[in-house]
Image (spheres, rainbow, N blue to C red):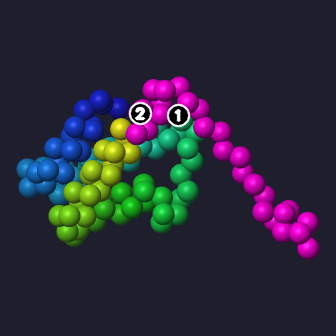
C-alpha cells in the first residue's frame, strides 16, 4: 500500500469538499484494507463486533453521502491514526500473540 495514504486521509479530513463524498468512500476503503493488512502482520485480530473500529469505518465509507461532515472527518482522522500506530508497531518488530481463554471450563470448575 502507498506510503501516502496517511497524508491523503489527513488532507481529505481537512478539505472534505475538494475530494467529494465518493472519493472519501474510496479513500476509506483503501485505509480499511491497509489497516486490515497491518493488523494481520502484527497479530491483531479484528473482533467483528460494532466495537471494532474497522466496522465503524466501513459504516462511514458505505454511507459517506449521508454522514455529517464531522463524522466523516473523524473517520478519516481515526483511520490515519490507526495506520500510523500500526506502522509503528510493525516497524518495531513487536509480535503480538493472543492467548484465548476458555471461560466455559473455568465456570464449570468453579461450581
Q: Is residue 93 magenta?
A: yes
Residue 18, percent from left and from top = 8, 50
- Is the residue 108 above or below the residue 4 in the image? below
Where disc 2 sits, the SS reads helix
Q: Earlier in the sequence, mark 1 or mark 2?
A: 1
Residue 3 appears in which quarter of the rendering?
top left
- Residue 41 is labelled as 1
Q: Is residue 33 visible?
A: no
- At label 2, counting other C-alpha atoms closer than 10 Å, the crowd grade (few under 14, some 14-19, many 20 or more) is some
Q: Residue at x 52, y 63 (%)?
A: 49
The residue under label 2 is 87
Q: Which quadrant is home to the N terminus? A: top left
Residue 37, percent from left and from top = 46, 38
Q: Is residue 27 visible?
A: yes
Residue 95, percent from left and from top = 59, 32
Query: Is residue 96 shown left or right of residue 72?
Result: right
Query: Is residue 98 shown left or right of residue 52?
Result: right
Q: Which residues are magenta?
A: 85-111
Where disc 1 sits, the SS reads helix
Give the number of the mark in front: 1 or 2: 2
Q: Residue furthest left?
A: 18
- At label 1, counting other C-alpha atoms closer than 10 Å, the crowd grade (few under 14, some 14-19, many 20 or more) is some
Residue 58 appears in which quarter of the rendering?
bottom left
Query: Is residue 4 shown left or right of residue 88?
Result: left
Q: Residue furthest bottom?
A: 111
Amino acid at each position: 500500500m502507498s506510503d501516502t495514504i496517511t497524508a491523503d486521509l489527513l488532507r481529505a479530513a481537512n478539505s472534505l469538499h475538494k475530494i467529494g463524498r465518493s472519493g472519501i468512500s474510496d479513500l476509506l476503503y483503501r485505509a480499511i484494507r491497509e489497516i486490515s493488512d497491518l493488523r494481520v502482520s502484527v497479530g491483531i485480530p479484528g473482533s467483528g463486533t460494532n466495537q471494532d473500529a474497522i466496522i465503524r469505518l466501513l459504516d462511514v465509507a458505505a454511507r459517506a453521502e449521508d454522514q455529517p461532515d464531522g463524522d466523516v472527518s473523524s473517520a478519516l482522522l481515526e483511520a490515519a491514526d490507526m495506520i500510523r500506530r500500526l506502522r509503528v508497531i510493525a516497524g518495531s518488530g513487536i509480535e503480538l500473540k493472543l492467548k484465548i481463554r476458555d471461560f466455559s471450563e473455568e465456570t464449570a470448575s468453579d461450581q
